[in-house]
Image: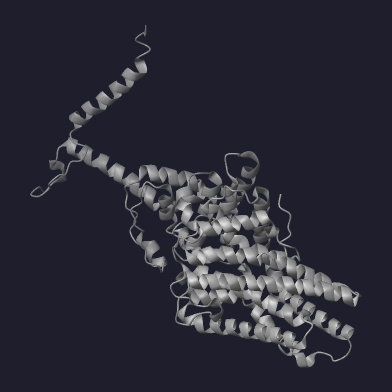
Amino acid sequence: MPTPNDRKPCNMESDLLRAKRLSRRKDGPAFEFINSTGSSRIGSHNGAARATIRRQAARSGRQGHLRENASQDLEDTSITHWVEERAKENAQDVIVIPPRTQQKNPYPRLIVQPSNNEYETMRVVYDFDITTLDSFIDVDLVVKAYRLLQKNPGEAASFLQKGSSSFLAHLPSRYGRTPVLNDVMHCVAAKASQIFGRSTTRCSLSELYMKALRSLHPTKETDPSCSISDIYCATRLLVLYESLGPPDTNALAIHNEYGIKLLRQRGPSRDWSSLDCMLLRSQGPYILTSDIYKNESSMFEAQEWQDLFCRAADMETNADAHYWWRFFGIVTFLPGILKDARALFSEDPIDPFMYISRSCGILERAEHLYRALNESHVLYQRSTSQPESLFELLSCTDIQSAIRVRLQGLLLYPAMFIFRLQATLSLSEVHRARGEERAQRLAAQMLVVEKITRSSDPAMAWHLGQRNGMPYSIIRTREEWLCINEPGGNWEELNTFLTQRWLRWESYWKETVLIEELERAQVECA
């Protein structure tokens, strides 16, 4: 039978609540408005009213103190702790910028009423929504992209747009799932807020970055509850952090290579979600570029990965996104073709019959890849209400979606490689001349479109400018690749000329475009 002592905690709690209610009745209402009209002396009010005023002022002062000194607290306390405490204590407060901050900040800010959603609270703290960074997810060559932004720094703000085509759209619903994602989101939000001139806090980016790294690396070993998807998402956000600039090429290499390591570890299983596919789509072109740079075949050639790309395409409802996966699955065979071509060109001496046999096999694979791209392109045109050819690169007045720009890249850049392979491996001089003419025409067209879209569609011009190192290299070497410059001697002399011409062009493109992006891409990850 319970004793009186067993019921003591419950009775004590009830007594405290009862005492608080009695105290409230004794002291009067919690909020009392005092009408001083007609009264000339403050002292004419009774003592109870003055005590009520003091209690109200103390509560209001404490809340105001928290709001005005939030930026100073960030230097001494954890961002996560500060956000949680702020959300609990001031969930219904209106955040107003102090006048001194408004004078320093050239960007207008709205008065924001935060909700109970944790992601929304983080957005209010940094005054930035990282889901608007869609355009920066589509960056494969970060150093070149940042350099272009430095030439026109005012354009960066115009690239902010909120969409549903990237994995960023999933972040609000995943905030709070794991500490590593929380820390990396805070890291990206703080940097973006400073880059775009919205920062009102004095938090240290380096401290947030180190905290995110400390959260990431123990997680992969000690926290089995944190899925590979969350860790992979964190690595992609760290690449986004570097993309906002100025980029650290060593850090980029580590984050990208670790992402590739996670993909290999997970493999093309059947439990890939929409988020998983979006994460892969954000890194896929970079992985192929890295394979070309390192002269390796792509792991995506495996049939299991090709099956995954087909499933990912079937999951898409948008025609551009659907055919992006179709095109990507085809283009994954390009690094292997280029690897075999370089191996053939680097062998010396080689039997003429063996060379012709191997070169014909490489050329056949390249032309098969191009035919597959063309077939998918025809199906793509039939699936849209306005069947515009991706080869025509649209008119200069049209605004293109980010996914369509990337879709064009998957078609056009591999095509230039294939045309130059035709200009090198074809046995017929006519076929070599035709391949080079097509490569020159396509390269010139892409450079012209980049130029004329700078005013109508700066985002498209920016994306084209990042990747137009190859078209520039083709235009630059035009004279050397004319058929009239080919020697008219025996087969060995012609073959030596053609192979050395290819190797010089490929080396020039890698040295001028890829080395500064990928020279440390083979850093070993712990």
Whether residue 315 appears in this view of the structure is: yes
Please determine whether, in this image, residue 13 is positioned above or below residue 525.
above
Colour scheme in use: one colour
When asked about the image quadrant of residue 425, the answer is bottom right
Q: Nearer the viewer, residue 31 or 505?
A: 505
State the image coordinates of residue 395 (x, y, percent, origin top left).
48, 82
Total marks shown come to 0
Of all residues, the one furthest to the top in this rendering is: 1
State the image coordinates of residue 260 (x, y, percent, origin top left).
66, 55
Please determine whether, in this image, residue 422 is positioned above or below residue 302.
below
When asked about the image quadrant of residue 475, the answer is bottom right
Q: Nearer the viewer, residue 156 or 90?
A: 156
Q: Nearer the viewer, residue 112 or 274?
A: 274
At x 70%, y 58%, the residue is 299
Of all residues, the one furthest to the bottom in this rendering is: 484
When asked about the image quadrant of residue 500, the answer is bottom right
Q: Nearer the viewer, residue 406 or 233?
A: 406
At x 58%, y 81%, the residue is 446
Is residue 443 left or right of 26 when viewed as pictured?
Answer: right
Whether residue 147 appears in this view of the structure is: no
Please determine whether, in this image, residue 343 is positioned above or below residue 300.
below
At x 43%, y 53%, the residue is 125
Name the quadrant of the N terminus: top left
Of all residues, the one furthest to the left in this rendering is: 38
State the image coordinates of residue 501 (x, y, percent, origin top left).
79, 82
State the image coordinates of residue 164 (x, y, percent, origin top left).
45, 60
